[in-house]
């Protein structure tokens, strides 16, 4: 297929990885970067406008659509694929000439943070809506979506693979991800318990005052190959879910073991389907069970290495790359094609 791919194209983004996955699956792909609308530069006029008005700057949206329409005219795509384009002009996207129009979201499409009134008004007109949340499937159908597809999240072998450490320090436990209210208390408690043996990296964590009173190492976000290098420093890598998205798995579910990190995550049906508890990962249901796992990891480094290696083999063998997801989406799109 010839796929016009509209999504955020910054280094390490999931959208870039999926676009590359479509290409690796044998499709011809043309990307139009939507980052300027999705994540306007902090303190720029579009950022100030979005903060003040609650929606994206119209001049920025128009500029993106002019690029999209020029690209579509030159490229003549078979598929228009939009990666979470809720802030774009839905009518202009749906009117692009193509055999099939697909909207994809990696987040819970029933969470108001991941929706816009304009998107909801046009949702039934998309030929296919793809979600990574199993619980969204029935909800999308109830909202009138024409066709709905479920695919899991994925990992990108270009970024998520075993790698040598770039720092001599090692940590017993670590978490790499965004600071969210549902994660703060638990991570602060762990930082108090494990101190300098804990690493926390990601947006927002350096602004948590309680962490400053611990000896935990707190730093900024890492993307791409730097993510895997950070994983290599950590014995037990926490896979935390987003409660606002009602996650039962996440990108980290695949990225951590793909990078040969030990997966220590919340117990869900999907996690239990993907990895075998105690031999390919460690799953927990509460803070007491988690600290017991971490204390055992400290006492049994050989077991940590064996379980991490087994988890890596399982995730790599079972077909969870973005190219695998791209093939699934193309098959769904062909079924949904009008």
Image (tube, helix red, strand yellow):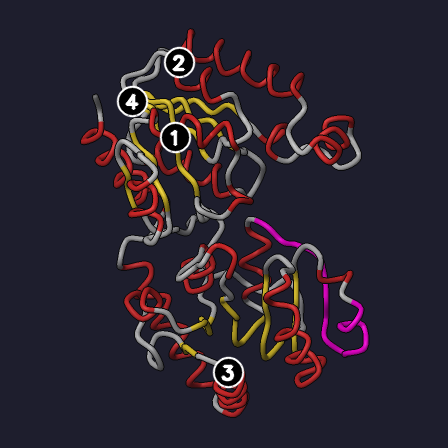
The residue that label 2 is drawn on is: 96
- Dot 3 or dot 2: first in sequence order is 2
Reading the image, the residue beneath label 4 is 100
Tag 2 and tag 1, C-beta contact below 8 Å: no
Q: What residue is shown with label 3?
A: 290
- Report crowding for label 1: few under 14, some 14 to 19, many 20 or more residues within 10 A (C-alpha): many
Of the two numbered discs 1 and 3 on the same chain, state the one appearing first in sequence: 1
The C terminus is located in which quarter?
Answer: top left
Stretch of the chain drawn in magenta: 209-223
Q: Are marks 1 and 3 in contact (CB under 8 Å)?
A: no
Alpha carbon distance from label 2 to label 1: 15 Å
Mark seen at residue 276:
none
| Disc 2 residue crowd, few under 14, some 14–19, many 20+, Cα 10 Å | some
Q: Residue at x 72, y 33 (%)?
A: 41
| SS of the residue under disc 2 | loop
Mark 3, Cα crowd under 10 Å, few <14 / some 14-19 / many 20+, is some
């Amino acid at each position: 297929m010839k796929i016009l791919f509209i999504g955020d194209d910054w280094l390490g983004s999931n959208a870039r990885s999926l676009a590359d996955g479509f290409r690796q699956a044998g499709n011809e792909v043309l990307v139009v970067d939507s980052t300027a609308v999705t994540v306007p530069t902090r303190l720029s006029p579009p950022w100030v406008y979005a903060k003040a008005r609650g929606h994206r700057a119209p001049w920025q949206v128009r500029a993106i659509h002019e690029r999209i329409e020029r690209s579509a005219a030159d490229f003549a795509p078979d598929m228009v694929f939009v990666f979470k384009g809720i802030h774009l002009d839905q009518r202009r996207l749906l009117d692009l000439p193509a055999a099939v129009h697909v909207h994809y979201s990696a987040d819970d499409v029933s969470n108001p943070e991941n929706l816009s009134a304009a998107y909801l008004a046009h949702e039934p007109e998309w030929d296919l809506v793809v979600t990574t949340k199993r619980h969204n499937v029935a909800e999308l159908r109830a909202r009138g979506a024409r066709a709905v597809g479920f695919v899991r999240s994925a990992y990108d072998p270009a970024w998520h693979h075993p790698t040598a450490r770039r720092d001599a320090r090692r940590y017993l436990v670590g978490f790499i991800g965004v600071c969210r209210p549902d994660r703060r208390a638990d991570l602060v408690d762990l930082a108090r318990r494990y101190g300098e043996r804990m690493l926390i990296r990601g947006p927002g964590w350096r602004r948590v005052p309680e962490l400053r009173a611990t000896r935990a190492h707190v730093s900024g976000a890492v993307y791409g190959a730097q993510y895997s290098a950070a994983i290599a420093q950590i014995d037990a890598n926490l896979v935390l879910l987003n409660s606002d998205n009602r996650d039962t798995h996440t990108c980290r579910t695949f990225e951590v073991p793909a990078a040969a990190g030990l997966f220590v995550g919340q117990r869900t049906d999907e996690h239990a389907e993907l990895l075998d508890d105690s031999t390919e990962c460690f799953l927990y249901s509460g803070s007491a069970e988690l600290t017991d796992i971490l204390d055992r990891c400290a006492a049994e480094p050989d077991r940590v290495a064996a379980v991490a290696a087994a988890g890596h083999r399982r995730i790599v063998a079972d077909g969870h790359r973005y190219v695998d997801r791209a093939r699934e989406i193309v098959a769904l799109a062909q079924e949904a094609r009008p």
